[in-house]
Image (tube, grey):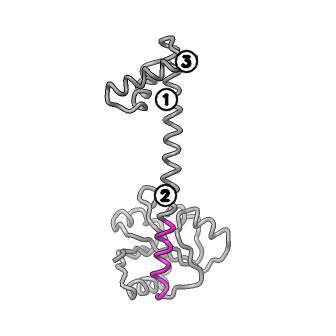
Amino acid sequence: MLTVMIVDDDAVRAKQLEQAFRSQHYKVAEVVESAFKLPEAIARCAPDVIIIGADSPDRDTLEHLCIATRDCPRPVVMFTDDKNSESIRAALKAGVSAYIVDGLDAERIQPILEVARIRFEEHQVLVDAANKANRTREEREIIAEAKQRLMADQSLSEDAAYHAMRRTAMADNRRLIEIAEAILKALPPVS
């Protein structure tokens, strides 16, 4: 059973959302009346999915959503009456997985959450791939800089500097990036 947390500053709509999710046998961990309390509530409840009810996704709500899900990402479903394409774009950019306009039919909850979960998982794969590519690029830049410093310090060719770094990494049972970082700390920049 999925656990959801509902965030809505409209008490009537929040109650309707809570009743709809409970009627479909979802556990409602908490109902939060303000996006300002979102980070603490997520840390406390660790919901599987965040449900946001809003007339329109305002900047403060979206900012708090970004902050709250940055370190602990999870699917977010937003129920709203705002059909504006800029609002939709802003919500999706902030991490909303499913943007639902014009009310909630309790019978639609399961497929809506399924779409949100799948879209979230696919987005996380892309984020992870981008992060890995960035780390790889940064590591290559560090290794290249370390190689340049080693070449200048010991009058080595590029190939010889690289092989010296590889031999040290293998002998010390460490990654090449670790050796490169140690070289950057030990040798002055090339002028």
The circle drawn on residue 125 is: 2
Please tell me whether mark 2 or mark 3 is closer to you in this view: 2
Amino acid type, mark 3: Val
Quadrant (top left, top right, bottom left, bottom right) of the N terminus? bottom left
The residue tagged 3 is 190
Q: Are marks 1 and 3 in contact (CB under 8 Å)?
A: no
Question: Is 109 a magenta residue?
Answer: yes
Crowding at mark 2 (Cα within 10 Å: few <14, some 14-19, many 20+): few
Q: Are marks 2 and 3 in contact (CB under 8 Å)?
A: no
| Point 67% across, 68% down: residue | 86
Crowding at mark 1 (Cα within 10 Å: few <14, some 14-19, many 20+): many
Q: Is residue 29 left or right of residue 53?
A: left
Disc 1 from disc 3: Cα separation: 14 Å
Amino acid type, mark 1: Ile
Which of disc 1 and disc 2 is earlier in sequence?
A: 2
Pick the front one: 18 or 170:
170
Disc 2 from disc 1: Cα separation: 27 Å
Which residue extends farthest left? 172
- Number of numbered discs present? 3
Q: Are marks 2 and 1 in contact (CB under 8 Å)?
A: no
Disc 2 from disc 3: Cα separation: 39 Å
The residue tagged 1 is 143
How far from the left and from the top, in percent, is residue 158?
A: 53, 20
For the magenta stretch, what is the residue range? 107-120
Q: Toward which corner of the image does residue 4 lie, by quadrant?
A: bottom left
Please say if 138 is above or below 183: below
Magenta segment's dominant SS is helix
Which residue extends farthest top? 155
Amino acid type, mark 2: Val
